């Protein structure tokens, strides 16, 4: 293996092994949140140690229309209701659940 191949291999390792500085989570959007964003789910990359509140902040930056429901959504992390201060982990699933009305 020549020097160039070795450097490329090491760079690939760094990128793959560098999961400690960021996490990827799956975000599920329901009801009005889905309507406002136009997507049922997405992958969100966040800095390690981020809270669910920081994830919501990022989502509102990407989808400003979410401000409409932000104050009244319920969050679920890995299928359990959670708070704004919960820390997200790599490959977690965060559900954004606005109020649902019907009859």
Image (cartoon, rainbow, N blue to C red):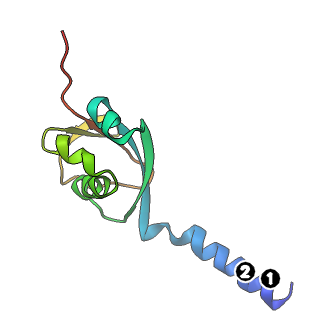
Q: Position of residue 70 (x, y in %)?
A: 18, 45
User: Which quadrant of the figure has residue 27?
Assistant: top left
**Who's the residue at 20% across and 14% down the image?**
102
User: Which quadrant of the figure has residue 87?
Assistant: bottom left
Element type at marker 1? helix
User: Which quadrant of the figure has residue 16?
Assistant: bottom right
Q: CA distance from mark 1 to mark 2?
A: 5 Å
Indicate whether 102 appears above or below 39.
above
Q: Are marks 1 and 2 in contact (CB under 8 Å)?
A: yes
Element type at marker 2? helix
- Going by the picture, which residue comes out furthest to the bottom? 3
**Who's the residue at 72% across and 85% down the image?**
7
Q: Position of residue 38 (x, y in %)?
A: 40, 38
- Going by the picture, which residue comes out furthest to the right? 1
Q: Which residue is the site of mark 2? A: 8
| 11 displayed left or right of 42 | right
Indicate whether 54 appears above or below 98.
below
Q: Position of residue 80 (x, y in %)?
A: 27, 35
Q: Which residue is the site of mark 1? A: 5
Q: Where does the C terminus fall, quadrant-wise?
A: top left
- Going by the picture, which residue comes out furthest to the top? 103
Q: Where does the N terminus fall, quadrant-wise?
A: bottom right
**Who's the residue at 34% across and 55% down the image?**
62
Question: What numbered label is drawn on residue 69?
Answer: none
Indicate whether 16 appears above or below 67.
below
């Amino acid at each position: 293996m020549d020097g160039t191949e070795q450097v490329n291999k090491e760079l690939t390792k760094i990128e793959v092994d560098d999961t400690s500085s960021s996490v990827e989570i799956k975000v599920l959007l329901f009801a009005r949140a889905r309507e406002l964003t136009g997507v049922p789910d997405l992958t969100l990359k966040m800095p390690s140690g981020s809270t669910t509140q920081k994830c919501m902040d990022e989502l509102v930056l990407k989808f400003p229309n979410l401000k409409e429901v932000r104050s009244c959504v319920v969050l679920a992390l890995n299928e359990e209701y959670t708070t704004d201060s919960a820390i997200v982990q790599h490959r977690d699933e965060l559900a954004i659940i606005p109020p649902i009305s019907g009859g």
